[in-house]
Image (tube, rainbow, N blue to C red):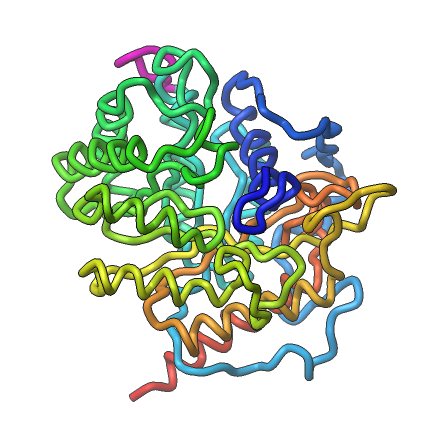
Amino acid sequence: MIHHGWRVRSPLVVATFALAGLLAVSAPIEVIGATEPHPTATVQPDEDAALIAQGAVLPPGVETDKAPPPGDVPERIGPADPSLMGIQSDIQPDSPPAARRREIALMQQAGVTWVRIVLNWYAAEPGKGRYNEEYLRGMESLLDEIRAAGMQVMLLVLATPPWANASGWQHPPLRMRDIGEFVGYAVRRFSSRVGHWEIWNEPDWHEFWKPAPDARAFVEMLREAYAAGKAADPKAVFISGGLAGNNVDYLRQMYALGARPFFDILGVHPYVFRRSPDEIHPHTRNSFNGIAELRRIMVASGDSRKPIWITEMSWPTNRRAPGATGDWAEGVSHATQATYLFRAYEKISQEYPFIKVAMWYNLRDKGTDPTLAYHNYGLVRNNFEPKPAYAAYQRQARALGTLVAARP
């Protein structure tokens, strides 16, 4: 499918496999709709003595691989808020304990403020009104661990259970009231630990909204989730499922269908393939600068008071596989990933004050195949070895914190 420059090898299809792998940890979800077969990710055993012996925390200033020279990653940027710094982590309640502790320590050492975690509806509510206490208690423990490390969590509600739609987890529920009731339950249960909730993921992309995107149905989902969530906790904050790229057409549809009262923050995923944050692309959806157009639509729709959160952004470091074609067949070098990461946060802080949080996707590579994009988004490799981007993220967080501390 080609739509506004998006091809089937887009980062969104890649993200489908990434999140599918995460969801499969907690429930036996069968991933369907793949554009091509992918090998199973190779995960380093948690009990690997050599890795564990290295320690969980990256010492300040350490750089591995071939980090860009200091001149390529500036130490200071314009005024911003350290809460801008967020990240997606794939840890779940049943993640191996040592790996979980290590990811939390790496995020803390990097200067992460916000962590995006999937709340797997499929795993949490295996039957209507029947809740998986093992999963939910495990989530409470996980949230407590992250919060104890000084970070806040946003929960992404995702994955339809079979009783709500037997067609598969990427299909929306047949009755939107079902997800609303689950969100109400989850907010009541977790409100002492979590105040921010993202409703679904990339609803404008067919890999997450099967069989095809439906803005009217998504607005109905937002309405049910928002009403039930606010009834459970009026202070809860709701982020609309991150749009796949700067999808201005879909946002216009959302507003035309009356979405405005049903979200507090607009979620966006400005993936731009191998392009830099400054490169202009003729399709707004494929240009990082397209965020400004989304903002113009919000203002024109009377929503200027609402912020935008980038709940995913990234440049993967995969190499081109033999015969691979398309925009996402090849990622960027490790040095370029670090440079683009720093520039993206710099650009956001200097040019887009309406963006309050920007989350990198993701902390740790999902596998070890160097030719698969969805194995290579991380700031650290699958074996926890930091890439240059980790040091760039760390410098960025320190710069923001230093600037805030220096203000009168």
Can residue 189 be seen here? The reply is no
> Image check: 258 left or right of 319?
left
- Of residues 43 and 268, the one nearer the viewer is 268
Please give the name of the residue rendered at 37% of the width and 17% of the height, measured from the top-left corner.
132
Q: In the rendered view, does 240 fall on the left or right side of 387?
A: left
Which residue occupies 56% across, 30% down? 20
Q: Nearer the viewer, residue 31 or 61?
A: 31
* Residue sitting farthest toward the bottom: 408
Look at the image and say whether residue 131 sits in the magenta stretch. Answer: yes
Q: Which quadrant of the view contains residue 294?
A: bottom left
Residue 341 appears in view: yes
On screen, residue 237 versus residue 312, left or right, reads left
Residue 106 pos. (x, y %):
58, 54
Between 95 and 181, the one nearer to me in the picture: 181
Most frequent secondary structure within the magenta stretch: loop
Residue 153 magenta-drawn? no
Residue 197, x across and y down, in percent:
31, 43
- Work out which residue is located at the far right of the displayed protein and give it: 322
Of the 4 image quadrants, the one containing the C terminus is bottom left
Q: Which quadrant of the figure contains the N terminus?
A: top right
**Residue drawn where x is 37% and y is 27% of the image:** 137
297 vs 126: above or below = below
Q: Position of residue 299 (x, y in %)?
A: 24, 64
Lateral position of residue 362 relative to residue 296, left or right: right
Q: Position of residue 377 (x, y in %)?
A: 64, 50
Question: Is residue 116 depicted above or below 399 in this figure?
Answer: above
Total residue callouts:
0
Relative to 111, say whether 143 is above or below: above
Instruction: Please provide the residue range marked out in magenta.
Output: 126-133
Between 90 and 353, the one lying in front of the other is: 353
